[in-house]
Image: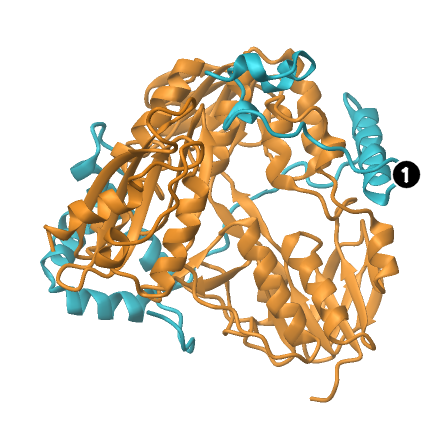
Amino acid sequence: MGEPHRICVIGGGAAGISAASMAKRTNPDAEVIVCTEYEDVAYSPCGIPYVLGREIPDFQRLFLAGPEQYVEAGVDLRRETPVTEVDGSARTMTAGGERIPWDRLVVCSGFNYTLPDVPGNDLEGLTYVKNIRRGIELNETLNGVRKAVVLEGTPLGVEMLTALAHRGIETHLVDEGSWLLSQVADADMAEPVQKSLEQLGCILHFGTRLEGFVGTNGRMRAVATTDGEIEADICVVATHKEPETTLARSLGLKLGSTGGIVVDEGMRASMEGVFAAGDCVEVPQGLTGIAVQGLTGAHAMQQGRVAGANAGGGSRTYNPVYVPWGMIGGQMAIGGASFGEHLATAAGIPFVIGTGQGVSRARYYPGAQVMKVKLLAEPGTGRLIGGQLVGGEGVKERADFLAFAMKKGSTLDDIAWMENVYSPPIGALYEPLSTAAQNGLSKL
Amino acid sequence: MAHHDEIPEHLREYFGPDKVAFFGAGGSPAQLAPPESPARRQGEAAVADALAKVGTDAPRVGLRPVVRPPKPSMKRRMRMLSERALMEDSMRRLGRVPPHAESGALFRRGFVPFWRALPWGLRRRMLTIASGVKGWTRTG
């Protein structure tokens, strides 16, 4: 295949926009077209819960660029132009009724929430946090909401619990799992976050199954669960991020065990000239090679850059992921990377644990916050396989550090004897990660 | 929170002691894009358009970003069922509240004990075969 003349990108989210920008930068002579069904690009959907929670004053602030900036960069950005059909053999796609030929195609079709398969799932009042304009409308709706249910304690679910509680709304969580964030976090690490949410007034129902939505005249008035009926004006559906693969399936692209599009290290899909990136693809977890999907906006952006560069004729590689994560729930920060005790137990991965507690600043400095750390390592070798942190400031940076340390094959011994910054306002003498690693060494 | 008094009065509405943004104390207020910048114009237009649609039947994109997942392949179905059973088993071991069990008896009473009894080397190989990504060179 020769130099690509026309590169088409499906989707205007983090992956799609970064793919288009990188494709144009790699190959300025190529015509780059981005089609998105939505009105807006280049805003932060991850900021929506914080406007709803009134931490950020308004939605304008979430916009990072305007469409003109892409035009100036030479990208043909077509908003409100859904791609309805893709023909792999003719190498064309149909967008907004127009048939557009492509030499390279980048599929960044994102995700949808999984529909709860229960009666009443079409009632008005079921709410989804994804698109900014619908978020702006939801912000107005919330002014009249007294009671709300959040379905599932996923990262978005936790952010929405916090946001709704800040609005003074009586907020319930309904979750089949045994604790908050049970798809990623450990029970003991999630507990301080749960307590903080309860202090904010949230009512948490764990081990509780959704049985249906109850409504009158097409409008939801309650959520039926195994724990009884919960009266609510709205239900925020924060279920699993199901990869959107309708077009990928019609193209015949190979899907993997998560339902996401299978890609190689260059984000190439199973058809020549077709790339994919973002929430619609699956990539390997770094330690085990297990396929994972539905990661963060940062992952989507980096995947898009690799896909775009390669679609433009470049040669970039995306690495397996160690998935650093973190968020605020109530007033606590929680985060981690790769495996926690729960996920490792579920997968049957052998591990030893090192736990520790420290402070974010010198003990005597005002504002010092307690941080609890749990590290997991391979028995014998001590190779780090995961870690989680909960507490105050500094969780995000340590989660990033842990992911990088794992990528480089670091051991508990490395972390136990690591150097650390000691400056009273920003760091204590004893680094909490180091303390946890020291404690873990004796168990190897 | 120790630093509440240090937050300027005009910011307390958004940075109050019960607010997430207060977390870490201080910092700059939420920034707007510069006046007349494309981001500012787009933001203002989006807000105006969305507010105009509140309470109307105007057509909207992205109102229900929700799907019933497509019929899973055998590989995906097996992964979903086994993953669910193993996660539930782990939650029963580590949690105070039992999860709401959804996995069937075959997976709960058959697959989970079988999986736990396998040596780690074999489990690892099975994980890679069943759920691993092939062809990447940098996996650990």
List the single residue furthest toward the front. Answer: A423
Question: Residue drawn 12% across and 57% down?
Answer: B114
Q: Is residue A182 visible?
A: no
Question: Residue drawn 50% across and 74% down?
Answer: A264
User: Would you name the residue on which mark 1 appears?
Assistant: B36
Amino acid marked by disc 1: Glu
Task: Please identify which colour was used for chain B in the image.
Answer: cyan
Percent position (x, y) of residue A392? 41, 30
Q: Chain of mark 1?
A: B
Q: Secondary structure at mark 1?
A: loop
List the single residue furthest toward the right. Answer: B36
* Above or below, comparing residue A347 to residue A250 in the picture: above
Question: Residue drawn 66% across and 17% down?
Answer: B11
- Letter of the orange chain: A
Q: In front here: A390 or A179? A: A390
Percent position (x, y) of residue B78? 32, 59
Q: Work out which quarter of the rendered image holds the C terminus of chain A and state it.
A: bottom left
Q: In front here: B9 or A212? A: B9
The residue carrying pointer 1 sits among few (fewer than 14), some (14 to 19) or many (20 or more) residues within 10 Å by Cα, namely few
Percent position (x, y) of residue A66? 82, 47
Q: Indicate how the structure is coloured in the image.
A: by chain
Question: Residue drawn 29% across and 34% down?
Answer: A358
* Above or below, comparing residue A57 to residue A433 in the picture: above
- Is residue A378 toward the left or the right of residue A148 in the image? left
* Above or below, comparing residue A204 to residue A93 in the picture: above
Q: Quadrant of residue A61?
A: top right
* Above or below, comparing residue A230 to residue A29 in the picture: above
- Is residue B12 toward the left or the right of residue A41 in the image? left
Q: In front here: A40 or A366? A: A366
Percent position (x, y) of residue A170? 49, 12
